[in-house]
Image (spheres, grey):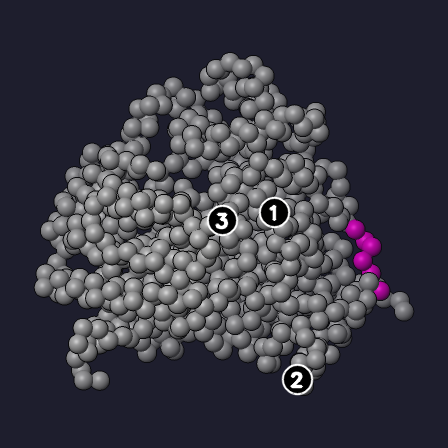
């Protein structure tokens, strides 16, 4: 309305099928939870305007993706221009935890972001409302192990949420928005010039591949 | 009451239609040909003549709308499931549906149900008019769909499908089973039928068996949109649903490929390319406009991977989508519906411009894309979708694979996957028996003897070493079957009789044999390494897609290496 360019932040939610990506997005954007969401085919997205950091208005454009592994290779169009990437797992499903790094790698390969080393990722463990007995045993240790060994020891923020009971969802997305905004400003400062980063991107990829996946 | 099919009037009417429409019906007839080829059966080719006027009228009058969740009132869009909530328009709708007033139409349906292929062949224009323009009578949809899958088999599901379905119900892949059970409740979450325990169990079995049977595809999210609707209309007949799924996938290899890990990316790119050029040819203004700022992949892939059924305002549309594709073929059917959706939404799309991408994506990804079509499905599926020349869809431009975008695994699927399965089974059998490390050529020739006269390269071919991850699974499946005397004791000849390969497989035969003999000599390890390197380069190459001058130099350099 003021004619000022509105800040649009693009957020991608990734993670295995059934970890609750759609539910997280719906809970954050529409404040509701349902058992009747459809399986996401391809991709879907919602937007929400929020205020962060001293009345700064931003629009979050949240992309929900298909979780089945074979869809990873189709991501290109959705990942491009992302400002933050949310890696989701299900606290009752160890495999979804172990796959975090492969989602991250695939994202970096396809999104072609300018700063793969310090691109903002955030980790969300969803479904903490379920019974403790069903949760992954010694989760914290395993999670540390993964961040240290597979996610390059980088201190990505970690949130444990329940999309069902609306626990920590708001909080997580606030952090997501802040991280995305930083990334956006960084891109603006660089004039969105990504042409110098090919070599970096290739190197990163080769390193990852040579290291192999521990799981 | 005596009633006989009035052939003379039918033909006369067909004549008048064809002179006024002047269409070739090329797609319809091509699709029919495919179906007939796949369904050809040596033991029964008898048209069933037992469907007469009485059964037709019973079917029409005794229909229970309250058990049909897929039918909605054409006026208010409300489901007819709950008759206590009927509004006036719903009542009118139901009473209009109860009768077929024209004797000509009665003649057509009786003729169609008794002998679908020759009816389509003789009366293509009338078929399209009734199927697509007017819409199938709700009461007959189940019967008609069933007929389309059992073309010239009487009412019998082919023995091969039955055997596979009955015998592959074990040794499911754990990962696939888990994925299937996650999706069962989230495909049509609001439809009660799909909450029923039997439905869930049977759909799960159908998809698990299919994954066993078609290891290459396995299971892919999105399939349930098709399988669920088929199962619903086939009144919970699991074997028929399985047969229909197999038939659809085998009649259209490219449809199969968009759901298969190794080929989906390539095939979807190809479809997008072809679709773009069709759009360009049909409506250049819209094409230029969208091309400026929209990536059509965002919505097209969702549409195609969910059979255009995942976000619809009501389920009648799903019925119409399926009617359309069953008759026109799936790839082309979905192309036409997609094109129709874009053209119908053109007024909205043209008002949006750079910066509004998300509005367009939101609109096209969700139910709202059906907009005005909802009110008049006949205009959409009848007039709009039939207004284009078939030739636009049949003479597609050749897709030039972008460098390095080729599927990593060589893609050797033939239309007759069923053959390949059994062939592979025989390979496994012979390997188990001899327990020797016979060379690849030997194995092929031994299977050649078993299935004399037919050749198609096994999709399970291990020669590229890419299937290692599946081998354990496969072996367990097939070793179980080895002990199944019902299967292994059948003389091979009867299989080949049942499994007529579509005509174009024959053309592939020679070419593929040569290829196989050559590759058998190549060291597997070297191939593996080569492929891995190519994969790496391909991925690196993908990362530099966006840039102009620098990247093209780099691309050239990489392409030289490969």
Q: Quadrant of the C terminus of chain B?
A: top left
Dot 3: chain letter = B
Q: Quadrant of the N terminus of chain B?
A: bottom right
Residue nearest the observer in this picture, B518 or A210: A210
At x 52%, y 39%, the residue is B173
From what the image shows, is residue B31 above or below residue B160? Answer: below
Q: Give the percent coordinates (x, y) of residue B235.
A: 70, 57
- Tag in front: 3 or 2: 3
At x 18%, y 73%, the residue is A53
Q: Specify whether residue B218 is painted magenta.
A: no
User: On the same chain: label 1 and label 2?
Assistant: yes
Report which residue position mark 3 lands on. Answer: B179
Dot 2: chain letter = B
Query: In terms of image quadrants, where is residue B292?
Result: bottom left
For the residues marked 3 and 1, what is the alpha-carbon distance in whole angstroms? 14 Å
Give the mark nearer the N terminus: 1 vs 2: 2
Q: Give the percent coordinates (x, y) of residue A81.
A: 23, 60
At x 12%, y 58%, the residue is A193
Q: Give the percent coordinates (x, y) of residue B35.
A: 62, 48
- How many other residues sit within 10 Å of disc 3, few (<14), some (14-19) or many (≥20)? some
At x 46%, y 50%, the residue is A133
Report which residue position mark 1 lands on. Answer: B206
Q: Main secondary structure of the magenta part?
A: loop
For the residues marked 1 and 2, what is the alpha-carbon distance in whole angstroms? 38 Å
Q: Which residues are magenta?
A: B48-54
Report which residue position mark 2 lands on. Answer: B87
Residue nearest the observer in this picture, B36 or B390: B36
- How many other residues sit within 10 Å of disc 2, few (<14), some (14-19) or many (≥20)? some
Q: Give the percent coordinates (x, y) of residue B144.
A: 69, 59
- Tag in front: 3 or 1: 3
Label 1 secondary element: helix
């Amino acid at each position: 309305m003021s004619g000022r360019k509105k800040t649009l932040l693009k957020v991608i939610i990734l993670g295995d099928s059934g970890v609750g990506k759609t539910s997280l997005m719906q809970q954050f954007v529409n404040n509701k939870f349902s058992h009747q969401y459809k399986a996401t085919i391809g991709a879907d997205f919602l937007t929400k305007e929020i205020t962060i950091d001293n009345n700064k208005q931003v629009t979050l454009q949240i992309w929900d993706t298909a979780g089945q592994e074979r869809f990873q290779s189709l991501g290109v169009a959705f990942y491009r221009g992302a400002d933050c990437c949310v890696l989701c797992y299900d606290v009752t499903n160890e495999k979804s935890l172990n796959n975090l790094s492969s989602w991250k790698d695939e994202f970096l390969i396809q999104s072609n972001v300018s700063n793969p080393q310090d691109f903002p990722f955030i980790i969300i463990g969803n479904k903490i409302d379920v019974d403790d007995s069903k949760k992954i045993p010694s989760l914290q240790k395993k999670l540390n192990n993964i961040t240290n060994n597979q996610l390059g020891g980088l201190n990505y923020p970690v949130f444990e949420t329940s999309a069902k009971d609306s626990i920590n969802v708001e909080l997580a997305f606030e952090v997501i928005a802040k991280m995305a905004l930083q990334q956006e400003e960084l891109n603006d400062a660089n004039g969105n010039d990504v042409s110098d980063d090919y070599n970096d991107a290739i190197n990163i990829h080769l390193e990852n591949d040579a290291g192999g996946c521990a799981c | 009451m005596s009633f006989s099919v009035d052939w003379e009037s039918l033909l006369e009417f067909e004549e008048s239609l064809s002179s006024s429409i002047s269409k070739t019906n090329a797609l319809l007839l091509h699709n029919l040909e495919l179906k007939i080829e796949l369904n050809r059966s040596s033991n029964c080719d008898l048209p069933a003549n037992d469907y007469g006027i009485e059964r037709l009228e019973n079917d029409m009058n005794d229909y229970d709308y309250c058990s049909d969740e897929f039918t909605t009132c054409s006026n208010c869009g409300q489901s007819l499931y709950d008759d206590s909530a009927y509004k006036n328009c719903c009542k009118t709708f139901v009473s209009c549906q109860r009768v077929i007033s024209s004797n000509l139409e009665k003649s057509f349906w009786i003729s169609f149900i008794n002998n679908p292929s020759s009816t389509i062949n003789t009366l293509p224009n009338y078929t399209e008019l009734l199927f697509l323009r007017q819409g199938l009578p709700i009461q007959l949809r189940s019967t008609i769909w069933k007929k389309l899958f059992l073309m010239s088999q009487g009412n019998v599901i082919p023995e091969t499908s039955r055997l596979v379905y009955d015998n592959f119900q074990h040794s499911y892949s754990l990962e696939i089973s888990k994925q299937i059970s996650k999706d069962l409740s989230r495909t049509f979450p609001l439809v009660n039928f799909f909450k029923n325990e039997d439905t869930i169990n049977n759909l799960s079995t159908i998809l698990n068996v299919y994954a066993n049977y078609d290891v290459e595809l396995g299971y892919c999210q999105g399939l349930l949109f098709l399988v669920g609707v088929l199962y619903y209309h086939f009144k919970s007949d699991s074997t028929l649903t399985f047969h229909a799924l197999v038939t659809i996938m085998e009649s259209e290899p490219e449809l199969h490929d968009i759901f298969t890990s190794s080929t989906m990316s390539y095939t979807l790119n190809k479809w997008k390319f072809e679709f773009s050029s069709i759009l360009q040819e049909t409506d250049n203004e819209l094409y230029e406009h969208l091309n400026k700022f929209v990536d059509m992949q965002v919505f097209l892939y969702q549409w195609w991977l969910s059979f255009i059924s995942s976000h619809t305002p009501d389920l009648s549309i799903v019925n119409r989508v399926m009617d359309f594709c069953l008759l026109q073929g799936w790839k082309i059917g979905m192309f036409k519906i997609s094109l129709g959706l874009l053209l119908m939404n053109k007024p909205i799309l043209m008002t949006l411009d750079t910066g509004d991408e998300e509005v367009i994506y939101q609109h096209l990804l969700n139910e709202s894309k059906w907009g005005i079509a909802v009110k008049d499905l006949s205009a959409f599926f009848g007039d709009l979708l039939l207004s284009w020349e078939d030739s636009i869809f049949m003479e597609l431009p050749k897709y030039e694979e972008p460098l390095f975008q080729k599927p990593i695994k060589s893609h050797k699927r033939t239309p007759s996957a069923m053959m390949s399965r059994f062939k592979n089974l025989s390979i496994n059998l012979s390997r188990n028996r001899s327990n020797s490390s016979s060379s690849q050529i030997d194995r092929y020739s031994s299977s050649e003897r078993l299935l004399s006269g037919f050749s198609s390269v096994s999709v399970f071919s291990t020669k590229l070493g890419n299937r290692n991850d599946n081998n354990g699974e496969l072996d367990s499946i097939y070793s179980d079957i080895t002990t199944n005397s019902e299967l292994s004791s059948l003389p091979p000849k009867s299989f080949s009789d049942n499994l007529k390969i579509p005509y174009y497989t024959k053309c592939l035969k020679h070419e593929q044999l040569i290829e196989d003999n050559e590759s058998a000599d190549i060291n597997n390890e070297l191939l593996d390494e080569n492929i891995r390197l190519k994969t790496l380069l391909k991925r690196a190459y993908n990362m530099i897609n966006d840039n102009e001058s620098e990247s093209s130099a780099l691309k050239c350099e990489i392409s030289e290496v490969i």
